[in-house]
Image (cartoon, grey):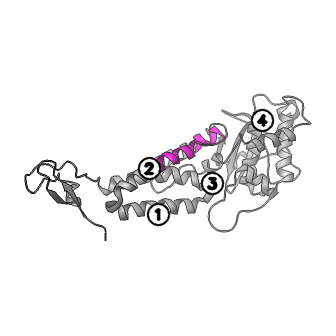
Amino acid sequence: MAEDFSYCKCPQCGRANRIDRQRAASHRPVCGQCAAPLSGARRQPPAVLILLGVLVLALPASQWAMPYLGRTAALWSAVLCVWLVLRYYRATFDAVWKVMLTMFGLSVCLLLYDRSPEAGALKLAGIAAIWQAPAGTLRSEPHRDYLAAVDARDAQINVLASQLVRGCATRDQACEADSIARFVADRIDYRNDPDGGRDYIKPPRQTLAAQAGDCEDKTILAVSLLETLGIRSVMAFEPGHVYPMACFDQIPEALQGKAGRQIAGAGNCFALEPTAKNSGLGVEKDASRIEAAYLVKGGQRLD
């Protein structure tokens, strides 16, 4: 059982006083011989403050770890951290508090460090969404997990995009987007996530290395390739499916007559179907099935 007493030397008479640390948390102790206040007896904050401190640490740490460890492992790690501190905080408060402050700083640094600044901002927005979520929900916009995985600043993604559009004329974004659409649809095989649990979200580099992924993984790769070339992109979510869209201020001549739609805040957008072989840019989609759409750069939700 954890020790509930400590010893404090009186600064006036020099007597060693045995301090009940639980009582000292709410009442300032005094010397038993001269009644002088014992300023060296440190008060400990109540458990609720410790819990809040751990949550401040656990939230960014679990958000950063989710794409790498998986949502379940990251959340259980956060719960274990909370339990350990609450179980042993009286005996190890000083050491744990210092470790918490250090880990919080590291977690924030890891959270903010990303090759894509937009992805880092989206991860922060995802943490804020936890506090804004209605009662009974963990996240108000779970789609942001997919947006946060987009990495348009990765060197390998940038080199691949440049290689894919070699046959396109300079600034012919319609040709570039079509080349990317065909590469993702034809060269990246469709493969479901393992059974059980939530979606396993792959970073684009991992999907590229595996040469396979589900619709979410292929969409993340597609928009990463589009964004690294400066092509505005949108992620459109349907029930059980997601696909990318390439957007332009003006409809390119090569896309005249192809299926597209104008989206406020994004422009004239044309869909890519990442799971259909031999499909390029301008696939016809049922707009009424879209439950949410996000501008990839900045993460703005589109109406």
- Where residue 223 appears, as percent x and y from the top left, is 74, 43
First reached walking from the N terminus: tag 2 or tag 3: 2
Tag 4: residue type? Leu
- Location of mark 3 (residue): 67
**Element class at badge 4:** loop
Quadrant into which the C terminus falls: top right
First reached walking from the N terminus: tag 2 or tag 4: 2
Foreground pick, 148 / 109: 109
Task: Measure the alpha-carbon separation of dots 2 and 4.
Answer: 37 Å
- Location of mark 4 (residue): 229
First reached walking from the N terminus: tag 1 or tag 2: 2
First reached walking from the N terminus: tag 1 or tag 4: 1
Dots 2, 3 in contact, CB < 8 A: no
Q: Which residues are magenta?
A: 102-122
Left or right, 108 with respect to 240, comes to left
Tag 2: residue type? Val
First reached walking from the N terminus: tag 4 or tag 3: 3
Q: Is residue 280 above or below residue 50?
A: above
Q: Residue at x 75, y 48 (%)?
A: 221
Q: Residue at x 65, y 59 (%)?
A: 199
- Where residue 153 appears, as percent x and y from the top left, is 71, 39
- Using the rendered view, name the quadrant where residue 81 is placed: bottom left
